Amino acid sequence: MSQIRGRFQKDADKKVAEFTASIPFDWRLYPYDITGSIAHARMLAKQGIISADEAQIIIEGLASIRKEIEQGKFQFKTDLEDIHMNIEARLIEKVGEVGGKLHTARSRNDQVALDLRLFAREAIKDTLLRLKDLQRALLNLAEANRDVVMPGYTHLQRAQPVLLAHHLVAYFEMLQRDIDRFKDCLKRTDVLPLGSGAVAGVAHNIDREFLAKELDFSQISQNSMDAVSDRDFVVEYEAAASIGMMHLSRLAEEIILWSSAEFDFIELDDTYASASSIMPQKKNPDVAELIRGKTGRVYGHLVALLTTMKALPLSYNRDMQEDKEGFLDTVDTLLSCLEILAGMLGALRVKAENTARAAKQGYILATDLADYLVKKGEAFRHAHEIVGKLVSYAVKKGKSLNELSLKEYQGFSPLFGNDVYSITVESSLSARNSTGGTAPVQVNKALSSARAILEGK
Ligand code: ARG
């Protein structure tokens, strides 16, 4: 019978034990559980709640259990429910009765909250590094293709010419907001819950400040009931991850579109593409598709946890054990997507001739033509109408704008002069010189400030 079933006459049914166990997934919290327990043992000894010798035995026992797990020698047991009980049971097995003193002044409720916060803190730090790596990959690609022109789209219709670098820095900006969100989430995650006990606090003379220092927490929770039942920090990570995945899915989608024969703007490296089992000519963008696809599970985990937490009465309820699988999977998924996408960007080839050709087609300079008339005194609305008619005329004639004669132009407005032929993709780009615009001057500025952000200047 497991060591906490003192009041029971029977063991739990095997199926029930399997149903209630979290060890199949929470074993991954072992490094945090052990780190937390070592700090707790030190605190107990410092406060004279256990002796220094007892603490020493416990700490050495825990360290050797960590080794056993790392070397794959530890036997996880489902009937011991979770990682906390598995480690405690093994500790008692190894060091005897004194191991039973570790859980003094502690409950699994504040213990699991601690483990999860320690895990989340690491996860956030890893996420921030990976976000920066992806920013770096975007920026490298943008800098290497500074002069590459492409169509800017709205409604997935060619709208106005832009620099590819401008398009890529848009994603750099999104990721910068993601970084800010995770940093913000870190502030609220970095709070020590240990010392809250099961619900009401702890009836021993503990030192929570000491624990916070040992475990490097910048704050201490101020309400024991909140501390054992709060999972906001997990929800926040998952929310920030969902927004991040939304960003990645948009970039993945563009990579998929751009690598299609219809766009033909980029060529994926062979290492990031898959072959078809039946059509030998195909080079499929499966990696980008999977990044786009995995967005679904990350959103799902967020909604699942919000739903699990909804209307839960204070304080800890076993429902909350459901927080872990989704959280672990969210972290794994986000980290791998960030890493893979950065690698894919580093390896792809931009087909600058094709993007430039596309930027010239489709009456993409029509806005510039309207702006030209405005500069000659026409009201914008009227200029818009004139150019609309002009485009419709050119479409009918099967001509591009620069193939129209001055006479044809002047048929629509007397304001057109010979200088209308100096409207080009290049003039269109450099005209958009407002802050944040696609003019090369602006884009170069954006590239250097992005570089400065990356290098932490
Ligand atoms: N396995 C539990 C969880 O993951 C640990 C806390 C259990 N506490 C309890 N009172 N049953 O949430």
Image (cartoon, helix red, strand yellow):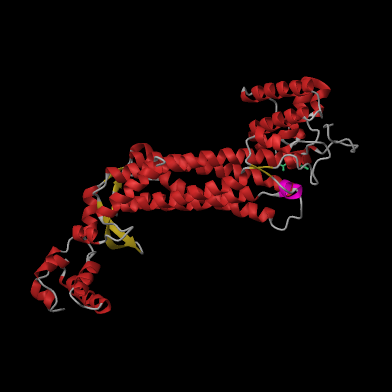
The magenta stretch spans residue 202 = no
Vertical position of residue 439 compared to residue 91: above or below: below
Relative side of 136 to 299, left or right: left
Question: Which residue is located at x 68 percent, y 53 percent?
Answer: 308
Q: Position of residue 130 (x, y in %)?
A: 47, 40
Main secondary structure of the magenta stretch: helix
Q: Quadrant of residue 196?
A: top right
Q: Position of residue 417 (x, y in %)?
A: 10, 72
Question: Which residue is located at x 59 percent, y 46 percent?
Answer: 187
* Image quarter of the N terminus: top right
Q: Quadrant of ligand 1?
A: top right
The span shown in magenta is 224-229
> Which residue is at the front of the view, 184 or 198?
184
Vertical position of residue 447 compared to residue 425: above or below: above
Q: Position of residue 383 (x, y in %)?
A: 23, 76
Vertical position of residue 28 compared to residue 175: above or below: above
Relative side of 237 to 90, left or right: left
* Image quarter of the C terminus: top left
**Numbered circles on residues, count:** 0
Can I make out residue 36 in this image? yes
> Which residue is at the front of the view, 336 or 56?
56
Q: Position of residue 362 (x, y in %)?
A: 23, 64
The magenta stretch spans residue 227 = yes
Q: Quadrant of residue 262?
A: bottom left
Relative side of 182 to 383, left or right: right
Can I make out residue 267 in this image? no
